[in-house]
Image (cartoon, grey):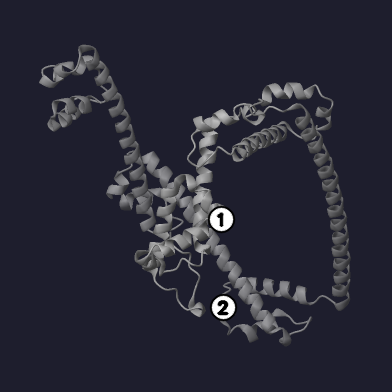
């Protein structure tokens, strides 16, 4: 703040760097005053402002230095981790061995404390050893699966009485046999495999029957549970819908003001016995339904106000609020519109009606078959074609509603005719892709 304020007012970029060099972020006003008091830019600030600006500056600068230190520490840790990752350390490597070999690396020296280096090393090695263990287990599992697949492929070579010593000679040429480093492990896995395939037919059948019965019991139990849950949900849903209907009826009878407030209205609703009938609805649900009710009331009031404007014969697209208001101010629908500024709602309604009138007129022009790409040349040659077009359009209320802005209507029609002229004759019907006519 100090260097920015003084530097800007004095128009001296060198002063900024000077202040950054002279003033420590953790110094005080009294200690640094003698360094800056003789600078002519010092006098640009009022006496009461100088210390305030100084203290703001050192506060900001202290935060910047803290962030810089934190960033540097984080960078050093990342570089230290990158050093360990590059070395592909063995899971048995100790910190002493690592420090002895790579202690001169700048990334190693970037961490100041040896205890912190060792902590980062141990954390990294924990992941290395975990990965090595997972790799070993995966390798062992793959070797077992491959060995069992080898036995499966050679099942026809032995029966339930076959012993390992008679089988291994037939298998030892296979790479999957050699992949299992321990002879005893091969025999254990062979015995496990033989126990699996030596089940008698009766035992297999009994297990299949038992499994089938258990599975059927599970299916029946699951069906019963689902039926009970469905029944409970249906009952709960019915009761909740009934509670919702009671609450909506309560709102319909007691809340007629679209500007009602939930907190005060709730106290009034609680006095009615129907409030208890809506007990299955929590407070949030009731408040949500209450807001929906207010929104419906607002929409109803707004729609009646729109109906009033629509029924007012004096209302035209160019009418102002002041002009229309004097015709409708005694109507109950005008008096009941209290949900917002009437003039603002009138302006929105008028603007929407104007946009709709323009769109309807565009649609009318597209529907008018006598308007073609030749119309512009025909109008330039004679006004007869233009009068024919207008005579045709005058039969449609989409044309008549724009009587109050005849000039804009004429311009819209002229623009449409010009666009058709520029576009030229339409393509043959079989190649036409029905693009929307431009306006």
Q: Residues within 10 Å of mark 1 (few under 14, many from 20)?
A: few
Residue 106: x %, y % from top left:
27, 48
Examine the image and state in which quarter residue 223 appears.
Answer: bottom right
Name the residue at 58% across, 73% down: 180
Instruction: Describe residue 141's horizontal placement relative to residue 16 as left or right.
Output: right
Residue 258 vs residue 247, the one in the foreground: 258
Please say whether residue 22 is visible from this viewpoint.
Answer: no
Quarter location, residue 170: bottom right
Q: Is residue 138 above or below residue 397?
A: below
Q: Is residue 419 left or right of residue 27?
A: right
Residue identifier under label 2: 178
In terms of secondary structure, where does tag 2 sit?
helix
The residue positioned 35% from the left and 67% from the top of the image is 381
| Residue 397 position within the rendered picture, expressed as x and y whole percent measured from the top left | 56, 52
Q: Locate residue 248 relative to residue 335 in the image: left or right.
A: right
- Between 320 and 399, the one lying in front of the other is 399
Q: CA distance from mark 2 to mark 1?
A: 94 Å
Q: SS class of the residue under badge 1?
A: loop
Q: Is residue 24 above or below residue 291?
A: above
Q: Position of residue 337 (x, y in %)?
A: 62, 29
* Count of marks placed on residues: 2
Q: Earlier in the sequence, mark 2 or mark 1?
A: 2
Location of mark 1 (residue): 396
Circle 2 or circle 1, nearest the eye: 1
**What label does residue 164 carry, if any?**
none
């Amino acid at each position: 703040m100090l260097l920015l304020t003084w530097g800007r007012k004095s128009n001296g970029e060198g002063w900024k760097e000077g202040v950054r060099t002279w003033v420590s972020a953790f110094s005080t006003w009294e200690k640094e005053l003698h360094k800056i008091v003789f600078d002519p830019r010092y006098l640009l600030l009022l006496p009461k402002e100088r210390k305030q600006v100084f203290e703001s500056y050192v506060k900001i600068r202290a935060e910047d230095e803290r962030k810089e230190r934190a960033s540097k520490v984080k960078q050093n840790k990342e570089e230290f981790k990158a050093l360990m990752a590059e070395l592909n350390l063995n899971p048995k490597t100790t910190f002493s061995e690592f420090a002895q070999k790579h202690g001169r690396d700048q990334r190693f020296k970037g961490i100041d404390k040896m205890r912190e280096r060792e902590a980062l090393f141990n954390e990294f090695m924990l992941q290395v050893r975990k990965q090595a263990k997972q790799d070993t287990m995966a390798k062992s599992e793959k070797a077992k699966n491959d060995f069992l697949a080898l036995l499966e492929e050679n099942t026809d070579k032995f029966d339930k009485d076959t012993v390992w010593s008679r089988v291994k000679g037939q298998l030892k040429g296979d790479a999957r046999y050699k992949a299992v480093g321990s002879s005893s492990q091969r025999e254990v896995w062979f015995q496990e495999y033989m126990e699996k395939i030596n089940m008698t037919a009766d035992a297999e059948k009994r297990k299949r029957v038992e499994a089938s019965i258990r599975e059927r019991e599970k299916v029946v139990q699951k069906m019963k549970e689902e039926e009970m849950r469905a029944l409970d949900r249906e009952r709960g849903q019915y009761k909740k819908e009934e509670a919702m209907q009671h609450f909506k009826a309560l709102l319909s009878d007691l809340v007629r003001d679209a500007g009602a407030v939930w907190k005060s209205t709730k106290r009034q609703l609680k006095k009615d016995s129907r409030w208890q009938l809506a007990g299955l609805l929590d407070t949030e649900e009731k408040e949500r339904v209450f807001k929906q009710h207010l929104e419906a009331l607002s929409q109803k009031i707004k729609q009646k106000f729109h109906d009033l404007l629509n029924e007012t014969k004096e209302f035209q697209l160019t009418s102002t609020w002041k002009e229309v208001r004097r015709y409708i101010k005694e109507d109950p629908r005008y008096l009941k519109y209290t949900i917002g500024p009437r003039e603002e709602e009138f302006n929105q309604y008028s603007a929407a009606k104007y946009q709709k009138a323009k769109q309807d007129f565009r649609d009318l022009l597209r529907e008018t078959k006598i308007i073609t790409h030749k119309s512009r040349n025909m109008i330039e040659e004679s006004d007869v074609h233009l009068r024919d077009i207008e005579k045709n359009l005058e039969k449609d209320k989409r044309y008549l509603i724009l009587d109050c802005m005849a000039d804009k209507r004429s311009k819209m029609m002229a623009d449409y005719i010009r666009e058709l002229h520029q576009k030229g004759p339409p393509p043959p019907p079989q190649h036409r892709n029905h693009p929307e006519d431009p306006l």
